Amino acid sequence: MKILMVSEDLPGSQVGGLGKHVVTLSNALLEAGHEVDILGRSDRFHEDSAREIGFKGRLLPGFGFSRPGWKETQLGFFNPVKRPWFARNIARALLQRADRYDVVHYHGHLPMAGRYVPAHVNFVQTRHDQGSECVIHVRFKENHVCTALDARDCAACIHPLPNTLRRSVSGMAVRRYRAETATSFARHKTIFVSDFLRRAFLRAVPDADLSRASVIHNFISYPYLKARAAAAGEVQAGKVLLVGRLDAGKGFGEFLAQVQGWLPAHARVRIVGDGPQRAQLEQRFAGPQVEFLGWQPYDEVIRMSARSHVLVIPSVWEEPCGTTVLEALALGKQCLALARGGTPELAAYQYYAGQLQLAETMPRLVERLAEALQRPPVTVALPAAFPMDVGNALPRILDVYEA
């Protein structure tokens, strides 16, 4: 098949989870004999972009994504025109090339893009976050999971004290956003990376037609991970690893505040990642037992993961389908996380009972961590295959393409 991947997250010097997903899938399709190009942002493109992101095929500049002056923050409401405008630009760019491909597969943050793609185009999109119904993509507000369904309540995410006008305009923007997304889902095929995401959209838009939707969990490159697994003697007892962007919702601050006084003397917590909260958290919590390492190359992250005693994913928002959890499970590591979002679905991929330990609260998660650190690290012989290796996901994705 000839496949065009499309994402506004690519190219880039530091690629997040969504971008890694696209590159992993694209490379696997290439290795399986398909022709794959990636269409991305022209304002980030340079001649070495494909190599920079680890893509073995051709990366094409397709659309600019620099932010014009919408002034949403200054005005204090979500603009009903802004996101459809970006979505239309992406649709216009992919339609210029769509007739050269058997399928166009979009991975991004504008789910209404399919609203601007004609029904005759074999268009598929993967939904990676809660942006199907939430304009800020995370359903997280004021340090808590947001359960509001009234579109006017979304105004509080753009202004701390929205008045009636701001609530009304923001409500219009969110209702349009959700309606156009529902139209896209009804017209074209959609892959949700967890059943949690599918159910979350139906909670906000109960009458949505999701008859063309599928659920396929995130995947990893298992041969890559297996080749970098640690031998039993290389695992460092007491080493705790946290990986992710240091911002609201990821739970690093909540975890570090809770873990004080609970760590045994031999324990060391290493935090890999960067973000807006790093300086504040490092100033408050860095010390003999807590080390901030900043952003690290993916190879180094996997090396540290394989040699750690325990991995902790402290997200307090509802992770849709954490690739970090899947990587930990595939490496045979014990992994602790909160029982939120799509994370409980990933317990299906444990090698042994209790490998993925889910806690309802942060205090309980820290208690379980302290218990785990009192025991020797668990080591297992890695099997020949892992269910959510990208190679195992390919047949299901190809079925969606051909449907």
Image: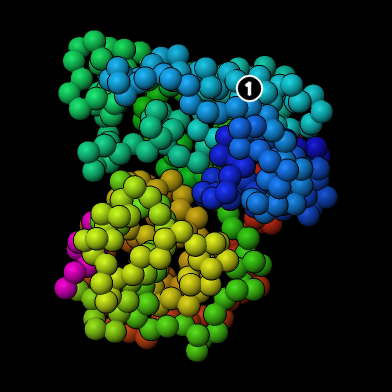
Residue assigned mark 1: 91
Q: Residue at x 58, y 18 (%)?
A: 88
Q: Which residue is drawn at 57% across and 76% down?
A: 229
Q: Which range of residues does the magenta coloring cover?
A: 254-261
- Near mark 1 (Cα within 10 A), the count class, few <14, some 14-19 or many ≥20, is many
* Quarter of image, res 40: top right
Compared across the picture, whether 63 is left or right of 215 comes to right
The foreground one among 227 and 62 is 62
**Could you tell me the amino acid type at mark 1?**
Ala
Q: Is residue 233 visible?
A: yes
The foreground one among 344 and 230 is 230
Vertical relation: 155 (above or below) 312: above
Compared across the picture, whether 394 is left or right of 240 comes to right
Q: Dominant secondary structure of the magenta stretch?
A: helix
Vertical relation: 226 (above or below) 360: below
Give the residue at the far bottom of this rendering. 233
Residue 256 on the magenta segment:
yes
Residue 232 on the magenta segment:
no
* Quadrant occupied by the C terminus: top right
* Quarter of image, res 44: top right
Q: Where is residue 283 in the image (x, y as percent from the top left)?
A: 24, 60
